[in-house]
Image: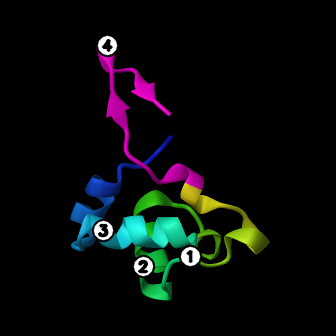
């Protein structure tokens, strides 16, 4: 399941661009990774060191709603 960047940003209390920038760089600050872990349940190390622990960023992106509530991935 993909988590919406805007919804995550709203829950954390930051601007969505902060998450988009970290996603593009494929690396988050420790503080952001900790907040993402709390909300998504994905281990913070996946956001800090994706090459070593696994890519948590694949689960972060915009959910686009289509007919009948199906989600495009």
Q: Residue 27 carries which label?
A: 1
Q: Mark 1 falls on what kind of element?
A: loop
Measured as percent of width and height from the top left, residue 40 is found at 46, 58
N-terminal-most mark, 4 or 3: 3
The alpha-carbon separation of the residues under discs 2 and 3 comes to 12 Å
Residue that label 4 marks: 68
Q: Residue 17 carries which label?
A: 3
Measured as percent of width and height from the top left, residue 3 is found at 42, 49
Give the extent of the magenta segment: 58-73
Please name the residue shown 47% across and 44% down the image. 2
Q: Count the numbered circles shown.
A: 4
Q: Which of marks 4 and 3 is in front?
A: 3
Local packing at callout 3 (Cα closer than 10 Å; few below 14, some 14-19, many 20+) is: few
The alpha-carbon separation of the residues under discs 1 and 4 comes to 34 Å
Horizontal arrangement in the rendering, residue 61 relative to residue 55 (left or right): left
Q: Mark 2 falls on what kind of element?
A: helix
- CB atoms at circles 1 and 4 under 8 Å apart? no
Q: Which of marks 2 and 3 is in front?
A: 3
């Amino acid at each position: 399941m993909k988590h919406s960047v805007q919804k995550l940003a709203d829950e954390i209390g930051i601007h969505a661009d902060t998450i988009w920038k970290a996603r593009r760089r494929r690396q988050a600050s420790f503080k952001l990774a900790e907040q993402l872990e709390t909300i998504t349940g994905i281990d913070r190390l996946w956001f800090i060191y994706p090459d070593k622990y696994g890519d948590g960023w694949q689960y972060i992106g915009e959910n686009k709603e289509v007919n009948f509530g199906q989600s495009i991935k």
